[in-house]
Image (cartoon, helix red, strand yellow):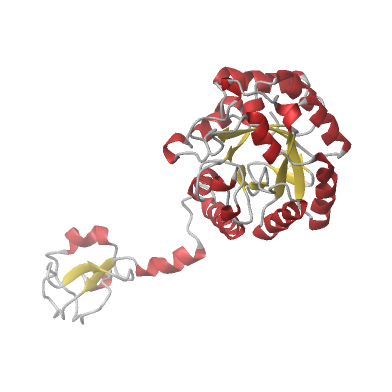
Amino acid sequence: MNKEIYIGKRKISEEEPTFIIAEISANHLMNYDRAVKIMIAAKEAGADAVKLQTYTPDTITIDCNGEEFLATTGSPWEGMNLYQLYKTAYTPWEWQPKLMKLAKELDIICFSSPFDLTAVDFMEEMDMPAYKIASFEINDIPMIKKIASKGKPVIISTGIAYMSEIEEAVRTCKEEGNDNIILLKCTSAYPTPYEDINLKTIPNIKETFDCITGLSDHTLGDSVAIASVAIGAKIVEKHLTLKREDGGPDSIFSMEPKEFKKMVKNIRIVEKAMGKATYELTEKQKSSKGRSRSLYVVEDIGQGEVFTTKNVRSIRPCYGLHTRYYESIIGKKARCNLKKGTPLGWNYID
């Protein structure tokens, strides 16, 4: 798998800053101007990209009230069938070329998740720079095959996938000659309980599939996203809305702009703090070393007087003899008069 992948002009690799995606999803509430405002807010908050979803109710499901077509009990969408849900959530296709144009004007990357083969064709017409496979589409092998054949980066969420399904999706991309694959740890629960996240899977995915990894996060707050960066996530995806109280299918687990901006800031802090594995000292550490401990005279001592545990101690700072010599000095005699506060040296010891 490729270790350097470009989405637009932005390189994603182990050496690059985390690629942060603001997912608009259904938070536009079927209002184009609101979608524009979310995109602007994403740019102002420091996101590298915004992501859309490209489907219609008819391309993702059918209008049916059979039990298996009802939204999950206990989910934010309980009481709706899937068709009704997606009718309130999809991003009208006529908006998307305009949003792509706006993204270029804002200098922010815009791409999307397709949900059927016609969506892939539509996205190609817009020359989208990458494709995102949603968790529930990871088993749509014909669509993955078509996406991979375009040669563009393929970001795959693994939220409901067994290992064998992840392997099949990856294998399908590779068979099409596409090694530009990024796998995202994801837990498909909305919002996701913290105890179900299992962030330790991120380094395991990286090791198992030898690929760039990241996190598609549906938890509340920014703690999980920030922690994921510390263990290797090179992509973080979070939903963004203007105000949660405005409602919508995804509002409950979406961030508001100030929260998103704070998350981006904290991720960048963590990236700086990660640094490298080293035992070298910085210049500040070296200058602070003078405040370490060493052996000092702590009471006035006369010439010929014996050094004892009472008149010699290990204290700060470190301009006396090393503390390793403490036991060998105790019991010896002073060569001259020594005042309290004198750093002990061999020239003072008989």
Q: Is residue 145 above or below residue 277?
A: above
> Would you identify the image quadrant in which residue 129 lies?
top right
Given residues 334 and 208, the one toward you in this image is 208
Q: Is residue 307 left or right of residue 284?
A: left
Q: Is residue 106 visible?
A: yes
Residue at screen point 73% across, 21% down: 174
> Would you identify the image quadrant in which residue 42 lies?
bottom right
Given residues 3 and 141, the one toward you in this image is 141
Given residues 317 and 307, the one toward you in this image is 317
* Quadrant where the image shows the C terminus: bottom left
Q: Is residue 290 above or below residue 110?
A: below
- The percent position of residue 120, horizontal first and vertical second, equals 81, 30
* Quadrant where the image shows the N terminus: top right
- The percent position of residue 91, horizontal first and vertical second, equals 74, 41
- The percent position of residue 269, horizontal first and vertical second, equals 55, 57
Q: Is residue 137 left or right of residue 56?
A: left
- Residue furthest to the right in view is 125
Query: Count the marks: how many?
Result: 0
Residue at screen point 66% across, 34% down: 84
Q: Is residue 151 visible?
A: no
- The percent position of residue 37, horizontal first and vertical second, equals 72, 57
Q: Is residue 16 left or right of residue 124?
A: left
Given residues 344 and 252, the one toward you in this image is 252
Q: Is residue 5 above or below residue 148?
A: below
